[in-house]
Amino acid sequence: MAYSEKVLEHFQHPKNVGTLDKSKSTVGTGLVGAPECGDVMRLQIEVDPSTQTIIDAKFKTFGCGSAIASSSLATEWLKGKTIEQALTIDNMDIVEELALPPVKIHCSVLAEDAIKGAIADYQSKNGIAVTAMATAH
Amino acid sequence: MMIKEPMRVYLDNNSTTPCDPRVVDTMLPYFYQKPGNSASRNHPFGWEAEEGVDYAREQIAALLKVDPKEIIFTSGATESDNLAIKGVFEMYRSKGNHIITVTTEHKAVLDTCDKLTEAGAEITYLKVAEDGLIDLAELEASIKSTTILVSVMWANNETGVIQPMKEIGDICEKHGVLFMSDATQAVGKIPTYPKEIGVHLMAWTSHKMYGPKGVGALYVSRKSPRVKVTAQMDGGGHERGMRSGTLNVPGIVGFGKAAEIARLEMHSDAERLSKLRDRLEHELTSKLEECYINGNVNHRMPHVTNISFKHVEGEGLMMTFNQNIAVSSGSACTSASLEPSYVLVALGLGDDLAHSSIRFSLGRFTTDEEVDFAVEKLVAGVNHMRDLSPIWEMYKEGVDLSNVQWSEH
């Protein structure tokens, strides 16, 4: 199975790989997947509390090329978005952008869950009502 | 000295081997100059095709130290496995319906056995230990009055682990049970002499021993015991009635030549490749932390190693170098429920280590430079993937991963 150019680009030159300080109240962390299932994504956001805008995003992913590309793309999309805007990112947007084949759709679902997980973590840390929970599937 | 960087290194010889150029040369006349059907008995075209097939049968018989009449040509190992197992079941149905096999067999054996349960077969699947070997006591205890066949692969395709064939043969003889082996990964690479071992049926293929694709064989013992299998296709009654269909003359001629080369060269090939394989293993395990070799290292094929690189997913790892290096992974990230290799899971590997495994299979044409190049690419790839891996980071921070609440999906 050949990967799309966009998947290859994100895989070879992943954007925003790294770790944010999870002890900071402005940082939210989403950790989804399981090693037994062959993929684990950790996506982190740093939020400016005055504007509720995501000022930084980092990821690390254990998984196949599509999983890595999906999380790399997600961090790119998150930067500069408000939390409200970030919550509108749909996994099918990722599928479309990366031209993922049907067997790799779960990678995009995982990325969407990681976004929602990171936002929920930020919100619960700061006493904000959690808007969306990552969906177990 | 400048070494020209090889662009593509093939370390996936357990999937298929290149066809040896000497084999190709031998086959070529049989496409145009000698176009006959080996079953045409009344003209020289048929005679010379038949001569080519007869000679190939002798070359193959010499490799196995068997009678040429005991070789049945087929389209490949999958067909040979089907013919052996279904053919024995149908032929010996009145004696019993019980077949014993192993959980780590190839799908051509497992799915064939599974299919036979619909026809009333009872199948026992032997487990393997952590090193991939079966328990001989468990095998013997599984044999009962209705057992008609024991089917154990000679060497495993994923790990290269070689089963204790002689001991299994002795147990089968003691209990008067037929012994069949899928020897696809072993024939032509290590000695496989069915009569010395007590194997009564043996399936394998040409394209894993430097011959062409599309041709395989089934060894069927003719003497003590005289074994018969029920044909699975109806037609002209070729191959002593066991396998109808016009013979693939050029393929068989190439298969024969491949067998002759293997008989003469397999010992030197094995000696060279085991050193090269050991070097590959040594280099990888000394340059990278947390690598685990899967399967028994003292009972395995000389050219194979299967290594798990902890906290790195196999398919992703392969993507770091698959423009240059061909290997195969025990992780198939191709469905919502990711399936790790059932062979590695049967060895007791956790799903995480099974997803982290890579199989390297060297071959006759693998060079030292290629192995060094592969090591370089592998080390870079594993490091790249670990830099990206959240669980590698957690592991390095001393987090006990078994206590983490994972969201299963």
Image (tube, rainbow, N blue to C red):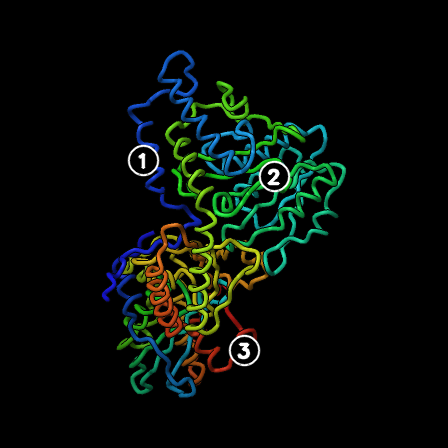
Q: Secondary structure at mark 3?
A: loop
Mark 1 → mark 2, Cα distance in angstroms: 33 Å
- Residue A4 image position (x, y, % from top left): 28, 57
Viewer-nearest residue: A11 or B76: B76
The three-letter code of the residue at mark 1 reads: Asp
The three-letter code of the residue at mark 2 reads: Met
- Residue B53 image position (x, y, % from top left): 43, 26
| Host chain of mark 2 | B
What residue is disc 3 on? B400
Quarter of the image where one finds residue B149: top right
Residue B183 sits above or below residue A32 on the image: above
What residue is disc 1 on? B25
Q: Residue furthest top?
A: B42
In this rendering, would B302 be left or right of B375? right
Quarter of the image where one finds residue B1: bottom left
The three-letter code of the residue at mark 3 reads: Asp
Q: Are marks 1 and 2 in contact (CB under 8 Å)?
A: no
Q: Residue at x 35, y 62 (%)?
A: B374
Q: Are marks 2 and 3 on the same chain?
A: yes
What residue is disc 2 on? B180
